[in-house]
Image (cartoon, grey):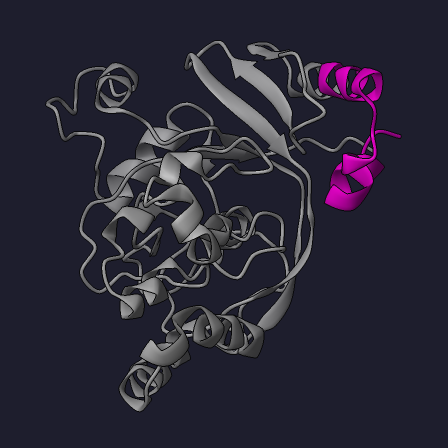
Amino acid sequence: MIKGPLEDVTEFARLGIEERRSLGRSVAAALGDGWSADEPSEDLDALPLAHQPTGLAFVVVPGGAFEMGLTEDDLAELRACMGDAWNDDIAASLERHAADLRPVRRVQVSPFLVARGYLQAKEVERLSGGRFQGDYCYRLGWNDARQLAASHGLRLASEAELEWLARDGGRSRFTLDAARRLEEIGGDSELLRSRFGVLDLFETQWAEDDYHPSYEGAPDTSVPWMNGAGTGVARGLSRPEYVEEPHQITGLLAALRTNETQREACVRFARDLPGLG
């Protein structure tokens, strides 16, 4: 049985380097041709894999459970980080947008594969066979992004998976704990390290899911939630570099999502793991 350690990130974190090597090789073999295991690290709670057909680096992200959506604990930490800058106007603004992020529910995240970074312009051009070109072609429309992933036997990360990554496996209220570390990093998001070795979580990127105006009726698993507005939903709405005033810390909350103004966003490939148990 190799499924167990990947279903719970806490259990996975206890594995030694030899166990991680063995698990990585087993996962690559189960995925089949085109996948190979890279050297794991005890510093990261993930298994690095290479995908030869796309030339991309992936990681196997262990699963677990977390509270998805804007929680009361999120708001309490936001107030603490903002200090005297917190006021009734900010509270009212958050309340107006809270319906989009609620009801809060406990989600069980299954282990999954995800690309370490979003596709750069040259990668989009190469992987699309030249359909998309130019310095800014790393930002695509939702349908184009999904079609590009599907053409390589992949998908986009689900909204629940992206929030799991942003919350660093359920342990952060802000994306990679950015708001509490602003002074330490001096506004440089590159200094914020994901426990999974995933990069660029602050860049606006598409989820596989349809957009839904709330989480009413949402699944309690990490599968993409479809049959919504058909317009796509994006995550990663702000960066530590943009925080110049205390109220802008709000944009770093890991729960935030949007589709209202999003026509193009970055593309991050993902895929399910095969049955490993």
Please tell me how many numbered marks the rendered image carries.
0
Q: Which residue lies furthest to the right in this view?
A: 1
Front residue of this view, candidates 137 and 200: 200
Q: In the figure, 231 relative to 63: above or below?
A: below
Asked whether residue 55 is drawn in magenta, I would say no
Q: Is residue 109 among what the camera can see?
A: yes
Q: Residue at x 71, y 14 (%)?
A: 29
For the N terminus, which image quadrant? top right
The location of residue 135, given as percent across then percent down, is 12, 24
**Quadrant in which residue 99 is drawn:** bottom left
Q: In the figure, 211 relative to 222: above or below?
A: below
Q: Is 240 situated left or right of 64 in this image?
A: left
Which residues are drawn in magenta? Answer: 1-25
The location of residue 166, given as percent across then percent down, is 49, 50
The location of residue 45, given as percent across then percent down, is 67, 34
The location of residue 161, given as percent across then percent down, is 53, 48
The prevailing secondary structure element of the residues shown in magenta is helix
Q: Which residue is drawn at 44% across and 46% down?
A: 184
Q: Residue at x 24, y 52 (%)?
A: 242
Q: In the figure, 79 relative to 107: above or below?
A: below
For the C terminus, which image quadrant? top right
Q: Is residue 8 among what the camera can see?
A: no
Front residue of this view, candidates 188 and 90: 188
**Quadrant in which residue 203 is drawn:** top left
Q: Is 217 situated left or right of 230 in this image?
A: right
Q: In the figure, 141 relative to 154: above or below?
A: below
Q: Residue furthest left?
A: 134
Q: Which residue is drawn at 30% across and 81% down?
A: 90
